[in-house]
Amino acid sequence: QLRLVESGGGLVQAGGSLRLSCAVSGFALEYFAFGWFRQAPGKEREGVSCISSKGDNTIYADSVKGRFTISRDRAQNTVYLQMSSLKPEDTAVYYCAATDLGDGLQSYLYNRWGQGTQVTVSS
C-alpha cells in the first residue's frame, strides 16, 4: 500500500527557506503524479504545486510562483518542495499527496495523503 510521510517543516523567519520532503513507499514513484497542498487555520485546503508522473510538467499556485519549487528524486523515492522567500502567510500544515487519476491542483484528484508537516513563518 502506498505510504507518504512528510518531513522538513518547522519554524523559520520571514525571508528564510525550508525544504519539505515526502518519502514514498509501497509503490514506484514513477506511476504517480504528486502534489503539495496546505491548510491554514480557518482556511480551505489550497493546492500549492504538483509534478507529473514523468516529472516533465509542473504547476504552481499563483501565490507561490517564483518562490517554491517542486521536484522528485526517483533514486531516493522522495518528492521535495523547496520553499524560499517565505512569508507569514505561508504558515500552514503542508500535505503531500499522490494520484494516478491525473495532474492538477484539485484536491479530488488525489487519493493518497500524508499526515502533514507544520510550517510556521514568523514576522
Image: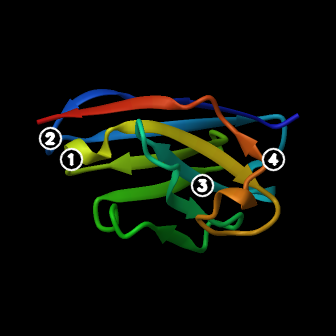
Residue 16 in view (yes/no) = yes
What residue is shown at x 65% (from left), y 55% (from top)? Answer: 34
Q: Pointers 1 and 3 in contact (CB under 8 A)?
A: no
Identify the residue position indicated by label 4 in the image.
28
2 vs 4, front mark: 2
Identify the residue position indicated by label 2 in the image.
14
Q: Which mark is residue 35?
A: 3
Measured Cα–Cα span from mark 3 to mark 2: 24 Å
Measured Cα–Cα span from mark 3 to mark 4: 16 Å
Image coordinates for residue 9, horizontal then vertical, percent? 40, 29
- Comes first in the chain, label 1 or label 3: 3
Q: Which mark is residue 87?
A: 1
Instruction: Determine crowd level at label 1: few under 14, some 14-19, many 20+ residues with C-alpha closer than 10 A.
Output: some
Measured Cα–Cα span from mark 2 to mark 4: 36 Å
Q: Pointers 3 and 4 in contact (CB under 8 A)?
A: no
Q: Pointers 1 and 2 in contact (CB under 8 A)?
A: yes
* Residue 87 falls left or right of residue 72: left
